[in-house]
Image (spheres, coloured by chain):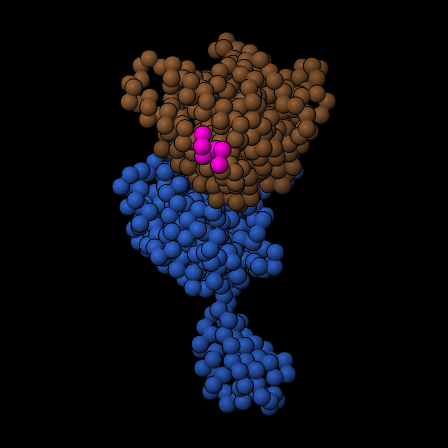
Amino acid sequence: MNALWALAKKDLLLLVRDKFALFWIFAFPLMFALFFGSVMGGGGSDSKGALTIAVVDQDQSDISRALAANLAKDKAVRLVRQGDAPESPDAPIETPSLEEARQLVQKGKRTAYLRVPKGFGDNPYAIFSGGGGGEVALEIGIDPGRSAEAGMLQGILMKSIMGSLRERFTNKDALQQDVAAAREEIASSSSLPAGQKLALTGLLGALDLFTQQFDLARLGGGESSATGDAEASPIKVVDVTRETGKKPRSAFDITFPQAIVWSLMSVAMGCAITLARERTTGTLTRLCMAPIGNTHLLGGKALGCFLACLAVMGILIAFGVFALGVRVGNWAYLGLALSCTAVCFTGLMMTMAVMGKTEAAVSGSAMGMMMPMAMLGGGMIPLIAMPKWLIQLSAISPFRWAISSVEGAAWREYAFSDMLLPCGILLAMGAAFFALGVLVFQRTQS
Amino acid sequence: MIQVRGLSKRYGSLTAVDGVSFSIAAGEAFGLLGPNGAGKSTIIHMLGGLIEASSGEIQIDGSSDPTKPSVRAQLGISPQGLAIYDDLTGEENLSTFGSLYGLSGSRLKERIHWALEFAGLSDRRKDRVHAYSGGMKRRLNLACAVIHDPRVLICDEPTVGVDPQSRNHIFDSIEALRKQGTTLLYTTHYMEEASRLCDRVAIMDHGKILAVDTVDKLIAAHGGKSVVHAELNQAPKPGTSLPGTLEGTAFKMDTDRPFEVVAELGRSQLDIRSLNVVRPDLERVFLKLTGRRLRDE
């Protein structure tokens, strides 16, 4: 065990210190995933970086329409327009029903929806009083995983509300209507003490006089500076988890498994080349004369490759999850998929290692072996975009099963029984390639 | 310790080693002296169990299977090529090879410390090998062979491409190991190395051992006589009696007693410009046995 670990550790150190190999193991696959992920739409439907919002206007009041119009002016938000010119600023904003809006969010076509409930326009100030009587003033429907976007949207919303109210405050007729309505409400109230009624009626009278004598439009010059304090506002955030439905949630869900197999290909090729390098530099002679035997020698090399594969996949997955929002449906299955994939690529490494006697020969042969497998197996064209006949043909490539198993654990919602096929094939291919490599190695050594 | 009988290795029609036999006693230093392609490295590869002999027998410490781990554990092999990892540090190289020979924990650390001292690389232990000089790499190559304290050290041309300082360091290191009782099998095509380090030397060419004995006995048997050369400023007068041959102003004489000849030349009142005595050596032995010079190959 000591010898096995010594050999594996030596190979890992050599791999980590090979800057050229590290580029192909980390930098290239990441560039691949990021580039194609971005080209294919990145993290979702809001490709321009703005939050695409569906507004469900159940109020249909001037206030609710003003709120939507103010929201549309914000560059951080995009409201989809109706008709043939959905991007035209003059076209009316789409008006989906609540159910339609919910589905749009579920399918990832909108980041969130905003529901303006009936009655919002009757008492827009309820936004500052906790909704009034437990009634929600506004509702945002968004996937709970998008907490950052939800917070941002609440801030934008508060800003738009303040903008709408400022317009109402600076509109003499609208404000006088509000004052008159408040006077009537105070007069008809049976719960208010007489003293308070008198004080409030006096205050409203002074406000009425103020609106008649001053040009209110002059008060509306500045930008509203609303705060997006979610705790203080009665904006309710509703859980609308995006539909998983065995579909990728973002383009990175597709490009990341591809990036992983590209990385593994580089790891396997790197490890294969080290065996050829050992042969040309003479270290293999020394290893073969050590009291360990070929089993330990090749086992150590395999262990090194296997651990390198796991480490590389772990780093890439961590980057995908934390930096790009790639989501993993089942971590246990992902662990299984990655382990089986590592076994398969370790086997491939062994075969590649004996495909030549020099580094150049192994490198060339390995490239010739791996590139067609990668292209056929979904390393370049995503499996999801392949025609049926090509998917059937891709069954001969370990890349296809590696991608399938990772996707199955990440977003295809594979059951354990579904995972068995790709994982079993990966293990079988790994064992076959490893056996072939060992056989050829032993024959060439003898 | 090591016994080799009728050992042969054939690659198709090429016979790399042809019926070689020799034995090495425990604690003895045995040299295989021959030009490149003589079959020295092939013999070492067969002793290390790396390649199988076509015929013949090898016995190492009583075992006839050199691939047995217990046999291999007794051997320390310093290959002709630099069998070390350039991208690892000296310490990491020693740790890797030490672990392969079953060393671990404090024993491994102790041996690494010893090996770095042995190779004179203690202050460069953390440097990667690609930053070492050629001589330092050679010393590390040797240190990796002895990290596990083997009973037999096999050195396959350990001084190829080495500067004089490192060569002397390697000689001193090997001599120190010999004093500790390590058995040595040393291949070289430098006669002075074989003369300095080896108790007995086998002269090899074309896969065969031509002669085996101590250096002195080989020279006595095959080296011939010493040669005295003298260059005179002017030819001696006619009728002058000289022990050797004279061609113009050049004097030459083969003799077993060169110093007596030099004394006689001094007494002859010849006007000598230069004097040179060439004693027989292994180079001469090889020339005599093969008709070729060692390093012409």
Query: In this picture, is A335 found above or below B223?
Result: above
Place of residue B280 in the rendered image (x, y in percent of width and height, measured from the top left): 49, 66
**Quadrant placement of the N terminus of chain A:** top left
The structure residue drawn at horizontal position 46% and vertical position 37%, both measured from the top left corner, is A225
Q: In the figure, what tint was chain B given?
A: blue
Question: Magenta segment, principal secondary structure?
Answer: helix
In the picture, one chain is brown; tell me its letter. A
The structure residue drawn at horizontal position 48% and vertical position 36%, both measured from the top left corner, is A213
Image-quadrant location for residue A6: top left
Closer to us: A155 or A63: A63
The structure residue drawn at horizontal position 45% and vertical position 82%, both measured from the top left corner, is B263
The structure residue drawn at horizontal position 46% and vertical position 55%, both measured from the top left corner, is B131
Query: In this picture, is A394 found above or below B163?
Result: above
Q: Give the range drawn in magenta.
A: A208-213
Closer to us: B179 or A151: A151
Q: Does the magenta stretch include residue B23?
A: no
Place of residue B10 in the rendered image (x, y in percent of width and height, measured from the top left): 59, 37
Q: Residue furthest right?
A: A84
Place of residue A130 in the rendered image (x, y in percent of width and height, measured from the top left): 38, 22
Task: State left or right for residue B52 relative to residue B98.
Answer: right
| Residue B204 visible in the picture | yes
Query: In this picture, is B180 found above or below A339?
Result: below
Q: Which residue lies furthest to the top in this view?
A: A417
Number of on-image labels: 0
Q: Does the magenta stretch include residue A210?
A: yes
Place of residue A340 in the rendered image (x, y in percent of width and height, measured from the top left): 50, 21
| Residue A264 visible in the picture | no
Task: State left or right for residue A358 relative to residue A417.
Answer: right
**Quadrant placement of the C terminus of chain A:** top right
Closer to us: A202 or A64: A202
